[in-house]
Image (cartoon, grey):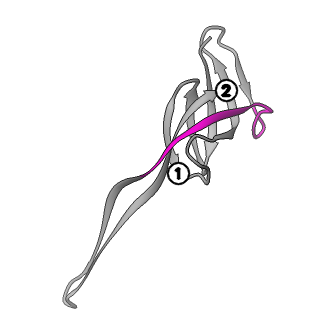
Amino acid sequence: MNTHGVIDVGGKQYIVQKGDTITIEKQEAEEGSKISFPIHMLFNEESKEVELGAPHLQHTATAEVIEHLKGDKIRVAKFKSKVRSRTVRGFRAQLTKVQITNI
């Protein structure tokens, strides 16, 4: 049974199914612990059934935290001509890799 769900994490929505591994914004949970996310929509590929929530369903998706990591470095460079002003700053996003265990 291929059931897909749309979950909401940190203001972003992800289409997931059981067994998927996704990288999301950092969650305050230890590695190996379980966390749950609200489901906004469920749909089944075989029976073509769709359940919509208003704003979310009673079901929740559970996931296991695999690891915490940092994203790629983003360089932000500012330059003002005729003033000799240059600044370069870097940024690395704090991310969490989770595996969906149940929908």
Is 91 placed above or below 68 here? below
Tags 2 and 1 touching, CB below 8 Å: no
In the structure shown, which secondary structural element does the residue marked by tag 2 occupy? loop
Q: Nearer the viewer, residue 66 or 18?
A: 66
Residue 26 x, y percent position in the rendering:
54, 53
Furthest residue to the top? Answer: 46
Residue at the location (48% across, 51% down)? 95
Q: Nearer the viewer, residue 86 or 38?
A: 38
Q: Is residue 84 left or right of residue 72?
A: left
Among numbered discs 2 and 1, the one appearing first in the sequence: 1
Residue 55 x, y percent position in the rendering:
76, 40
In the structure shown, which secondary structural element does the residue marked by tag 1 occupy? strand
Check residue 55 for magenta coloring.
Answer: yes
Measured in 3D between alpha carbons, the distance from the residue under mark 2 to the one under mark 1, in whole angstroms, is 20 Å
Residue at the location (80% across, 33% down)? 58
In which image quadrant can residue 102 be found?
top right
Residue range in magenta is 53-69
Image quarter (top left, top right, bottom left or bottom right) of the C terminus: top right
Is 47 placed above or below 20 here? above
Q: Is residue 9 left or right of residue 94?
A: right
Q: Nearer the viewer, residue 85 or 102?
A: 102
Is 41 placed above or below 73 here? above
Check residue 103 in the rendering and tell me which mark sits there, or answer none: 2
| Residue at mark 1 | 25
Residue 21 x, y percent position in the rendering:
49, 32
Q: Is residue 21 left or right of residue 28?
A: left
Name the amino acid, label 1: Glu
